[in-house]
Image (tube, helix red, strand yellow):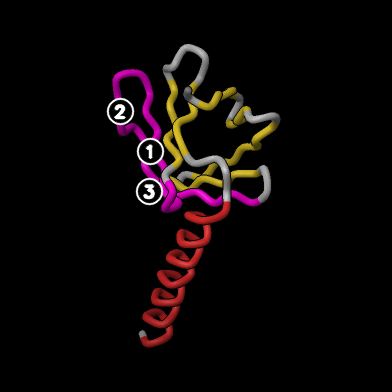
Amino acid sequence: MRAVATWLLMMQLNSATIEDHQMNTHPYVGMWVTADRNIRHELLANGRYVEARGKRERAYLGRYVVTGNHIDYWDDTGFTADGDFIDDVLHHAGMILYRDK
């Protein structure tokens, strides 16, 4: 039981460190949208994201990590996904998302 508690504490500390690092180092924070604005990803400065789909403003919530131009997502239900930023365009799961202006 003690090993599990230690592991959980380390994961929380690691998550906080990742979020603190994310807050200060990557240029992709903000809203990303498909051309029709049906899919919207808001990348928050604390390493969390909110994905909206159509009229569902909070369809998916989770955390993300940016490494260079690559993004990894973990939603709060356990689903994972990833994508790449190419020329200030996010390529994610077969979708193209543009920085919202």
Distance from the alpha carbon under mark 1 to that under mark 3 = 10 Å
Q: Earlier in the sequence, mark 1 or mark 2?
A: 1
Q: Amino acid at mark 2?
A: Glu
Q: Amino acid at mark 1?
A: Val
Give left or right: position of 4 versus 28.
Answer: left
Q: Which residue is mark 2?
A: 57
Give left or right: position of 58 versus 35.
Answer: left
Kindly identify the residue that appears in the image at 48 percent across and 24 percent down: 100
Magenta range: 45-67
Q: Which residue is mark 1?
A: 50
Q: Label 2 near label 1: C-beta < 8 Å?
A: yes
Give left or right: position of 53 versus 21.
Answer: left
Q: Earlier in the sequence, mark 3 or mark 2?
A: 2
Judged by its main secondary structure, the magenta piece is strand
Q: Which mark is residue 12?
A: none
Q: Label 3 near label 1: C-beta < 8 Å?
A: no
Q: Amino acid at mark 3?
A: Asp
Decide: few, some or many residues near mark 3? Use Cα within 10 Å; few <14, some 14-19, many ≥20: few
Distance from the alpha carbon under mark 1 to that under mark 2 = 8 Å
Give left or right: position of 74 versus 56.
Answer: right
Which of the two residues, 78 or 47, is positioned nearer the viewer here? 47
Of tags 1 and 3, the one toward the viewer is: 1
Q: Which residue is mark 3?
A: 76
